[in-house]
Amino acid sequence: MPPLDPTVVPLTDVCLVLEGTYPYVQGGVSTWVHDLIRSLPELRFGLVHIGPEPAAYQGRRYALPENVVYLDDLYCREVVSGSSERAMSTASDARVRDDDVVGRSLLLRGLRRLQLDSDIDAQLLDDLGAGDLSVAELLRGSASFRLVRELYQQLAPGASFPDIFWHVRSMYLPLVRLLRKPAPQARRYHALCTGYAGLLAAVWSQRTDRPLILTEHGIYLRERALELYRTVWVRGNGDGRLCFDRATAAAVDALWMRFFRTLARCAYFRATAIVSLSEVSRRRQVEDGAPDDKTLVVPNGVDADALLARLGETRGKRVSERVRVGFVGRLVPIKDAVTFLRACAIAARWVDLGVRVIGPEDEDGDYASRCRRLAAELDLGDVVRFEGAQPIERIYPELDIVVLTSFSEGQPLVILEAGAAGLPVIASDVGACRELIYGRSELDRQLGPSGIITHLAAPVETAVAMMQLARNPELRARMGAIGRERVRRFYRHNGTIARYRALYEEADRPWPASAGA
């Protein structure tokens, strides 16, 4: 599919605005997006994908369905050719020198409000959508420098000004680049997270007066908070010395969180429907500023019959007496495979385990290498196999227990797939994991547990759960049967698709009085 010509954008039924996911990252949200598009063949989809830079991805991981009209790639950081860069610089020099004009920039006024104003309104989205500030003006204009100085004086007066300066530029540069993009023609916009994608979709929705639906699989704001907490440049370099002084570290942390919180609130403000996958996540959205009356829960679903048909006759066949334990997911820090491997090392001392780490490793090669080194250090060479991504029929028929040790989740499709396959699950207490294993409603809870919930980053507790299930095949069978019944009764794929079809139809109706207010 050729790059999208911005002067000729076809009208679509739904413009999906994505960030760091489909079609370049395998699994998780990408699997969900691919399935949604294929399950609604009567709708024409446009895809806008926001990534950090062109070199971040190694090509598409999915063949786009026939009802995808276009794919437009936008980047927060983009290297332009020398001739283009010189032309941009020459054309913008005059505007940079005309500081009076730059000082009246509506976009610059909007960027100021993102950090200093607690009110979110239509005027803010209008200002951000003005697109009347160039990258050169942001980087070299004295009006933008005055804005950084004002932010420093009001929000971080005790911090290092040069550090605050560079971080504010890092926040605003992607927005200036993205907000200059014309709004694609669409009957509805659908953002798959808050952040840059949510803000851009909100601005486009405001520009075109077309509705916006927001779906959060994980809570973007909470995931960015976790990343900030774990970031070396804020917390230190591993030897006890901070990369910044403490005042600057705290100020940088607070600035980024204020920034991402405001981006989320802009998307919440404009959206007509704010979807989460679990009641836990819905409550967090409300805590983060989403109007309660706009929020709703639409859990994921799977086609259990189709999945079992794919598993076919290999289901249940054994090749050894070892209890087969599987980690199924991307090998990235947020999935915390380190805790999983440490738990395996503990449990393997007491029970005979065969462990498989299944999932793509190319998203964060350094973390994947770290996990392989850790497995060697823990003397797990005869226990653990790293297998990369596998088709579903090569996963669940060859497992007895599925384990997730994530720091953050929405509603893991892996738990639903394992349930449909009749496998018990051990999972950390994040997102919808507790609901999926213990039940979401009173009727659901009456079925009983389909696995075991553990605390975050708890290798000993996870190991104890593994040993409990490994030593008790009857318990595994009972929990697996409960998981299969739970999926069949409460997490049906056709129910999820029907709800989104209805959401798209409802979005075309006149907005309620509370929408955007």
Image (cartoon, grey):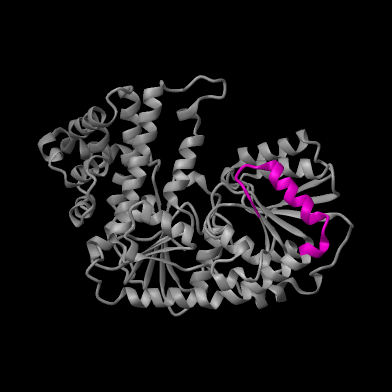
**One can see residue 77 in this view:** yes
Q: Quadrant of residue 193?
A: bottom left
Going 54% across and 57% down the picture, which residue do you hit? 60
**Spot occupied by residue 84 in the image (x, y as percentages of width and height):** 32, 42
Residue 260 vs residue 312: left or right?
Answer: left
Q: Quadrant of residue 305?
A: bottom right
Q: Is-magenta flag for residue 117?
A: no
Going 11% across and 40% down the picture, which residue do you hit? 101
**Spot occupied by residue 283 in the image (x, y as percentages of width and height):** 42, 57
Write down the region rendered in magenta.
453-476
**Residue positioned most to the bottom:** 42
**Spot occupied by residue 127 in the image (x, y as percentages of width and height):** 19, 50
Q: Depth check: 445 or 484 in front?
A: 445
Count of all numbered marks drawn on residues in the image = 0
Q: Depth check: 154 or 466 in front?
A: 466
Determine whether 83 is above or below 153 in the image.
below
Q: Quadrant of residue 159?
A: top left
Determine whether 140 is above or below 270 in the image.
above
**One can see residue 193 in this view:** no
> Magenta part mainly helix, strand or loop?
helix
Going 31% across and 46% down the picture, which residue do you hit? 175
Quadrant housing the C terminus: bottom left
Going 66% across and 64% down the picture, which residue do you hit? 449
